[in-house]
Image (cartoon, rainbow, N blue to C red):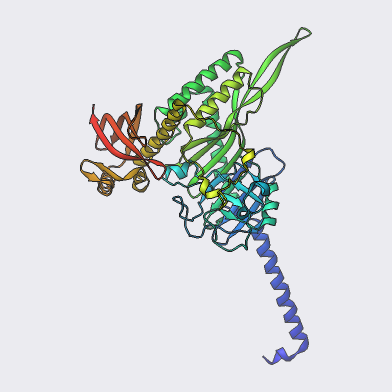
Amino acid sequence: MAFLKNRHIRSYLFWHLKVSFFCLIFVFQANAEKIIPNSLIAMQTNRAIDYVLLVEKESQQLYVYAYDGQFRELKRYRCSTGENKGSKKQSGDRKTPEGIYFFNNRFTKRDLTPIYGTRAFPTDYPNYMDRFAGKNGSAIWVHGTNKKLKDRDTNGCVAMVNKDIDELDKYIDLHHTPIIIQKKIDYVHPNENEPIRISLIQFLRTLENLMMFGDSKAYFSHYNYISDYIPQWWTRWEKLRNEIKSSYPETCIQFKKMILLKHDKIYVALFDQKILTGTVRRANDIQQIEPMAFSAGKKKFFIVRYQEKWRIVGEEYQTSTVRKDQNYPLIAAATNISNKSRLMASTSTHVKKQSIIKKEKQPIIKKETQPAIKKEPQSTIKEEIQSVITQMIDSWLIAWGSKDNEQYGHYYAKDFRSKEKNRKAWLNYKKRLNKKYEFIKLSRKELKFQFYRKYKDRVKVSFKQSYQSNLYAASGRKTLILKKEDGQWKIYREYWNKL
């Protein structure tokens, strides 16, 4: 090491190491710029720039990614998530949910109690997949705070310092901007998601074409389940479609402003359904066709990859984008379909007032801003309960058919009994059958409801059920007695009579 005593050699080595160090930093930064979160697939919204938010619970960071033809990290903020680790499963577990959500409201300081800081943005938790998994709870917000921000210090919300939440406001477009909450963000090169992006868009274009020109069998072959709810929806749409095509043959439906995202094995597609047609007008004896477009609702698909094919496992109407021209008959009809479908996809999840009120019992939203609440007619309440239960039964059948015993068990009450089996014995019995059968196919029709006068929290439901596996097949009358448990409808008793 005597040569290191030479001053010139030492200077040269120091300079060489310095250059190498900065080159490594440059290479690292260049590589970092080439990777994006694995959950970002595509945003074809025709906007000059669009945004998506990501929360990484492990690092307690909230990221803003911009999309202007490619995804890039724009901002990074510190945040605080639920006190307890893991994904939210039930109300009061002090966990932050994990999944893909959208903002459905915004509040400013004058609307809020001090603990929520200067701004708050409620999300649409629980979404379809949360409800399918039997998860409950509500009021999951991204909001400010009136105290020092600490890691994992909320009841399940995502909290930020006030100056950051104020800045975040400009990146949020209600019912459009997604927030993806994950334990840890996985990164990939954008090219890795390109085959998925192309394949998903082709899949959606196929559905788009079938909606306008296909029949129900072809359209619903791309779903992972089938029930009589689907043909009812299709019947209403088919009637409207025929009315449109009889007046305007050159009509099509397009999925516009598509957002494609991923969380775990679930892909979410959000898009506007646009009906494009034209009206024939005459001006100075010259026939002109004026193009016309109107909305049939903003829709959200939950999609999985199953046996090398895309399958829809759930859908929701996010919100109607129709705001005017309601007197036009086609728009009114499309809006009617959108509203009916949204009602059928709705759930009984409601925000509990206790979670968002001041200690002195004053509402979070000032009283003078609240309109008078009219009592719902009894028939409307029953229709809403039927809609919720219909969705619950379909989700239960999906879990059963997919042999997912854990999800299947979420739909049974704690005091369930059938065939002298309690809940635990029943689920063990089903687990043994799942191992025995290679596949299970289920369908239902002729759903009937009976409401009890004496027991307001119980409903009797019956339907014709078809069951098929590789070893056994049968059709019969299924009867379920449902009860309310922790705000959710659960199966209390289950009976089967072979036809």
Q: Is residue 451 visible?
A: yes
Which quarter of the rendered picture does the N terminus lie within? bottom right
**Residue 33 or residue 185, whichever sits in front:** 185
Where on the picture, by quarter, is residue 175?
Answer: top right
In the image, what residue occupies the spot 58% across and 60% down? 60
**Residue 113 or residue 165, whichever sits in front:** 113
Which quarter of the rendered picture does the C terminus lie within? top left
Q: Position of residue 455 (x, y in %)?
A: 33, 35
In the image, what residue occupies the spot 26% across and 29% down? 476
Q: Position of residue 34 (x, y in %)?
A: 64, 55
In the image, what residue occupies the spot 29% across and 34% down? 468
Q: Position of residue 248 (x, y in %)?
A: 61, 15
- Residue 385 lies left or right of residue 105; in this view the side is left
Q: Position of residue 173 (x, y in %)?
A: 66, 42
- Residue 133 lies left or right of residue 104; in this view the side is left
The residue at the far front in this view is 360
- Residue 29 lies left or right of residue 352; in this view the side is right
Q: Is residue 217 visible?
A: no
The residue at the far top in this view is 285
Where on the picture, by quarter, is residue 463?
Answer: top left
Q: Is residue 481 above or below residue 327?
A: below
**Residue 165 or residue 119, whichever sits in front:** 119
